[in-house]
Image (cartoon, rainbow, N blue to C red):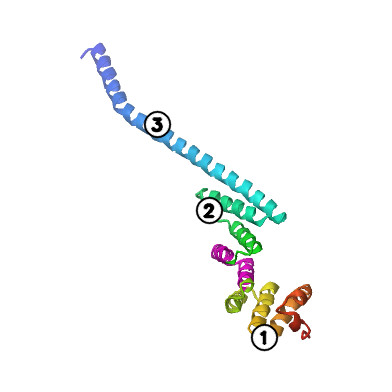
Amino acid sequence: MTSNEHQVSEHESTEEQDSEQTPTNKTFRIVCMTFCLAVTVLFIWVWHHQTQFNDQYRKATFLMRNGEAKQAIEAYQKAIKNKKRTIFFTQEPSAYNNLGQAYLYAEEYAPAVENFKKVIEMAPNIAEGYVNLTTAYLRQNLPVEARETCLHALNTFPKTASLHYNLACAYALEGESEKSVKSLTQAVNLNPDLKTLAQEETALKEIVSELP
């Protein structure tokens, strides 16, 4: 074989290799571009709904400060709806807690209870959900549910004054004066300001005078 024939053969071999690699390279580039596009779209989607959540959350908080509970409920619902669409950061206990507070303010107790239960599911290590849930029960004159929830929560949060206070209210509504005094005493020991609040609480007015 001459030198020229050898060079032509090598050239043809190189072209065959390039032709074999080209489809693979194109496929790889297409996959990379598709992946990058998907990540970009996903980022924009998450960013958009997180921004919408922040806007609606701030709006709802402003409305609650002005006593506009009905409008605040709508804004919190929109905020939660957008939060669910962020895919990776869907749980926000404070939003459900604030929505429950808005329902409580609007005297819509059933949805308030539902939202406070969601708070407890999402953040079982935070006492506020239990405090608000028992408050909602008491507003509905459901002392048994309030008592049972307080006793359960106090196993985890024994130094939460508001739970002792709500337990005192539950016992008072059930006619358990001695237990009510004991629970109220523990509440006031943890937070002396609760004594003033108890003096204005219908269920506890007579109990306050029995405090040591």
In this view, the residue farthest toward the bottom is 178
* Residue at image location 58% in from the left, 75% down from the top: 149
Q: Real-space Cα distance between discs 3 and 2?
A: 33 Å
Q: Which mark is in front, 3 or 2?
A: 2
Residue plotted at (65% across, 86% down): 175
Q: Main secondary structure of the magenta part?
A: helix
Magenta stretch contains residue 202: no
Q: State the residue at coordinates (60%, 64%).
A: 108
Asked if the residue under mark 3 is in contact with the one under mark 1, i.e. CB atoms within 8 Å, the reply is: no
Q: Which residues are magenta?
A: 110-137
Q: Amino acid at mark 1?
A: Lys
Location of mark 2 (residue):
90
For marks 2 and 1, give the CA distance.
Answer: 41 Å
Nearest-to-viewer mark from 2 and 1: 1
Q: Which residue is mark 1?
A: 179
Q: Residue furthest left?
A: 1
Q: Which residue is mark 3?
A: 29
Neighbor class of circle 2 (other Cα within 10 Å; few <14, some 14-19, many 20+) is: some
Q: Residue at x 54, y 48 (%)?
A: 82
In the rendered structure, the answer to whether residue 182 lies left or right of residue 137 reads right
Q: Which amino acid lies under the numbered mark 3 shown in the image of this protein?
A: Arg
Q: Position of residue 122 (x, y in %)?
A: 55, 62
- Mark closest to the chain's N terminus, 3 or 2: 3
Rendered image: mark on residue 145: none
